[in-house]
Image (cartoon, helix red, strand yellow):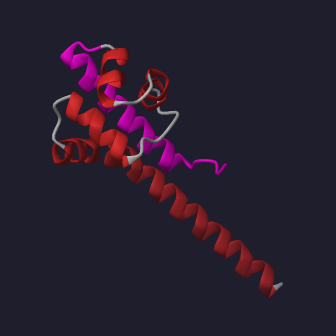
């Protein structure tokens, strides 16, 4: 199983936050949402903790239960995820550049 990088973990955490917030706003339990969406409560719990990334079909079904239009969800996800992801992307790019510089220094020596 592939390990997730920081950006992927941040993405999952953003989805987790929004799903939990949407469910709690309606006052629904995980059991109710999971049952109506056709998934297990354990799966929904993993999504809401950011431990697992939902597939698009199941996510769509959960969004229907939460009365959330997919385009509105993705817009909200972008607002939540981008501020977190931008510094991570910058740090990753800097790390790549530093590694490249070190490689070129070794090749010259």
Residue 94 image position (x, y, % from top left): 54, 63
Name the residue: 21% across, 28% down. 66
Query: Left or right: where does residue 50 sit relative to residue 5?
Result: left
Residue 11, quarter of the rendered image? top left
Residue 92 image position (x, y, % from top left): 54, 58
Along the viewing direction, whichever of 90 and 48 lies nearer the viewer: 48
Q: Please say if 25 is above or below 39.
A: above
Along the viewing direction, whichever of 68 and 13 lies nearer the viewer: 68
Chief secondary structure of the magenta portion: helix
Reply yes or no: does residue 11 show up in magenta.
yes
Query: Left or right: where does residue 41 sit relative to residue 108?
Result: left
**Quadrant location of the C terminus?**
bottom right
Q: Please say if 18 is above or below 98.
A: above
Reply yes or no: does residue 27 show up in magenta.
yes
Name the residue: 57% across, 50% down. 5
Residue 27 image position (x, y, % from top left): 23, 12
Give the total of numbered labels. 0
Which residues lie in the magenta part? 1-28
Residue 52 image position (x, y, % from top left): 50, 37
Along the viewing direction, whichever of 94 and 14 lies nearer the viewer: 14
Name the residue: 24% across, 26% down. 22
């Amino acid at each position: 199983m592939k390990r997730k990088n920081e950006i992927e973990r941040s993405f999952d955490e953003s989805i987790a936050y929004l799903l939990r917030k949407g469910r709690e706003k309606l006052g629904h339990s995980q059991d109710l949402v999971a049952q109506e969406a056709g998934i297990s409560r354990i799966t929904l719990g993993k999504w809401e903790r950011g431990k697992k990334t939902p597939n698009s079909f199941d996510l769509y079904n959960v969004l229907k239960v939460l009365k959330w239009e997919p385009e509105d969800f993705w817009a909200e996800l972008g607002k939540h995820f981008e501020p977190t992801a931008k510094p991570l992307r910058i740090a990753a790019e800097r790390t790549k550049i530093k590694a490249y510089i070190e490689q070129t220094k070794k090749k010259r020596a």
